[in-house]
Amino acid sequence: MKVKCPTCQTDVNWEEKSEFRPFCCKRCQMIDLGDWATESNAIAGKPATNTNDAIAVDVEEIEALLAKQSDSFFTH
């Protein structure tokens, strides 16, 4: 089966020996990676909200659980 390289549109054989599939070469693979890293490529979706509020952590509750686990570990 042949597919088009996402970067340069060259025909690529889709088979195990095609090391960089779906890309035609390492260069095209790295260009694509760079586009993702610079956010030129992105997956459509709802923008993230304030990430600081995304996970509410109760530090005191976690410390209490760790202390409880530690106590039971040393008493056995």
Image (spheres, rainbow, N blue to C red):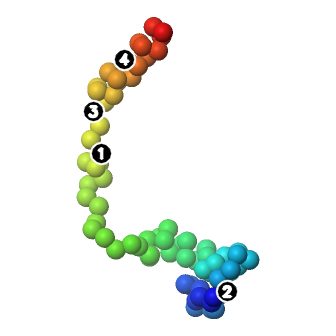
**Secondary structure found at label 4:** helix
Q: Between residues 34 and 17, which one lies in front from this camera angle?
A: 17
* Residue at the disc numbered 4: 68
Please give the name of the residue rendered at 55% of the width and 76% of the height, measured from the top-left corner.
32
Q: Is 34 left or right of 44, judged from the image as shown?
A: right
Residue 52 position (above or below residue 48)? above
Identify the amino acid type marked 2. Answer: Asn
Whether residue 46 can be seen here: yes
Please indicate whether residue 76 sits to the left or right of residue 16 in the image.
left
- The correct choice, above or below, for 25 with respect to 34 in the image is below
Query: Which residue bears the numbered disc 2?
Result: 13
Q: Earlier in the sequence, mark 3 or mark 2?
A: 2
Where's residue 6, x and y in %? 55, 84
Query: What residue is pinned by disc 1?
Result: 55
Residue 22 placement, left or right of 38? right
The image shows residue 60, relative to residue 51, as above or below, that is above
Residue identified by numbered label 3: 58
Q: Position of residue 49 (x, y in %)?
A: 25, 58
Of helix, strand and loop, which one carries label 1?
loop
3 and 1 marks in contact (CB < 8 Å):
no
Task: State the CA–CA distance, disc 3 to disc 1.
Answer: 10 Å
Residue at 29% across, 37% down:
57
